[in-house]
Image (cartoon, coloured by chain):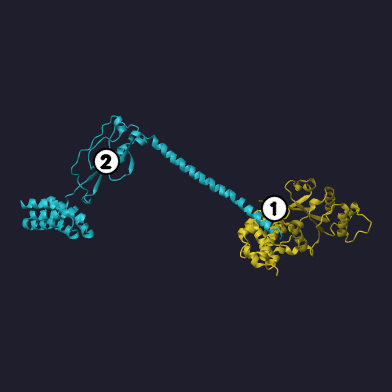
Chain colours: A yellow, B cyan
Amino acid sequence: MKSRYTAAKNVFIDSIDIDDYIELSSSVTAYKQLEYSMEKPLKMILLFGKPGTGKSILLNRLQEKLKYKKEIYYFDTPTTNDKEFFHKLFKVLTKQNLPHNTEVNFSALVNFCKNLRGKREILILLDEAQMYSAEMMEKIRLISDTRAVKFVVSLHKTDDEDLIAKEHFQSRIWEIIELKNATQEDQTSYVHKKLLKKHLFEIANSIKEKNMSLIHDFTKGNFRECNKIMFTIFEICEYYDEHEPSKIDYEKIPDRIIEMAALKLGYINV
Amino acid sequence: MYDIKVLEEEWKKYNKNKKKPLYLLLGVLCLIAIVSFLFYQNKNFHFDSKMDTQNINTIQYPKSNSVVLLDKKLSEILVESQKISLEDEAIVDNVNKNNIKIPTLPIVDDIPLIDDMPVGKIVLSEKPKIKINKKPKIRLSDKPRKKIHLNIVESSKVSAYSDVEKRFKQSHDTEDSLFLAKSYYRKGNYRKAEYWALQTNKINSSLEESWLIYVKSKAKLGHKNEAIRILTNYAKRSNSSAAWNLLLKLKK
């Protein structure tokens, strides 16, 4: 017989599945801001924040919502070479596959885009854009200058390097939307909503405010870290449920288990 | 989950370490408390030691074995009050040093009672304030103490007796009735003395003093034969020398 915690554990497997999207007050604000910015005649919009703040899922949500209204494309996996990227772009713009043994002529592509101006309004969502080379970003900028293609660039904000300060972003980005780590209330709501979405009411109820305070302290409000710790917590609970039920309190998650999960994930150490 | 036991062990260590600062803090607080206490104690010791050792007396009370350290002047006051003395004396050394003459209180045999004050109560009175033309700067520790006179005053006021009588009716305390008997006898009111001595005997027939007052009052009222008869009975019963002596006196 499967433990009650197995299903709960699986809820927190990290993914950018649009079905897993949880509407929180902070993410709704960011979404509206992004939607509003896209209506403006901007060439590039920068969406940035620390890893795990929900950038990818927000872009997914945006595509999902607007796909029937706008010509919108989501580039999830960054390509490290120009060739591959322009193959993708060619397909999006021309809606045709590139013939074998041929390469995209960048100048021709720019001209093609110029011709599209006023006829089509194409929106490209570039996830993990910090992985694109500066040269490629320059080419993306030139394409955006045609005003036929608008880019939403999603970037990681890192502590040691402020990417916004980079020259090619400074002069061209017209709108910046920053995603921040969740507050404790948002994180609590996130965890509860996720569990309730899978009808795990009792387990959601067993996670108390005090537990969430501890989880928030460990994860600093990061959604990806939150998913990781919740997964580990339920993994430990699952083990106890199956092997040593006396060590588990079904009414509330003991702090001991949360701390054990934090130890396992390296948030704290002995 | 294959590493749960390892994780449990790690958590135990973590939990132990987590509580370390708490224990440390508690230890520090305890230490601070102990040090503060010792410091306070030490401070008190210095304060005491700064006092003039000449001004410290040890009084050994005859009835108890406890030894009490008192300021010399305070001890004098207490000794004085024990003796129920109205003697006056100089108040403060410091004042004496400045050659300031302090008016001494006259010895008062009969201090008038406050109206509502019951007889036999201890009356506290303060010494009148001393007027000094030149105000010498007196340190706090050298401030003159107020002298307290403890006087036991007997009141002859009728209201005071009636208060005791009222109280006796409620308490049936033989001390009150005996007091009334003695007081009335001294005042020459033998009828009342006889009555209160009888009341005392009714409550406690073993009190010799009340028997003697009763017999003496009877004799004073002219019932000498009856007095001798009663006293003879009592003397035989109690074999009291005082009773026998009084009997001889009455028979003379």
Residue kind at label 2, given as amino acid type: Val
Residue at figure coordinates x 63%, y 58% from the top left:
A256
A14 lies above or below B143: below
B18 with respect to B48 (left or right): right
A260 with respect to B204 (left or right): right
Image coordinates for residue A82, horizontal then vertical, percent: 87, 52
Residue kind at label 1, given as amino acid type: Gly
Chain letter belonging to callout 2:
B
Taking the view exactly as shown, the residue that stands out farthest to the bottom is A1
Residue B79 got which mark? 2
Chain letter belonging to callout 1:
A
Residue A136 got which mark? none
Taking the view exactly as shown, the residue that stands out farthest to the left is B252
Image coordinates for residue A266, horizontal then vertical, percent: 69, 53
Q: Where's the N terminus of chain A, which quadrant?
A: bottom right
The secondary structure type at the circle numbered 1 is loop
Distance between the alpha carbons at the discs numbered 2 and 1: 79 Å
Residue at figure coordinates x 33%, y 42% from the top left:
B67
Q: Is residue B161 visible?
A: no
Q: How many marks?
A: 2
How packed mark 1 is, by other alpha carbons closer than 10 Å (few <14, some 14-19, many 20 or more), is: few
The secondary structure type at the circle numbered 2 is helix
B217 with respect to A210 (left or right): left
Q: Kindly identify which residue carries mark 1.
A: A266
Image coordinates for residue B131, horizontal then vertical, percent: 28, 35
Q: Is residue A84 visible?
A: yes
A205 with respect to A79 (left or right): left
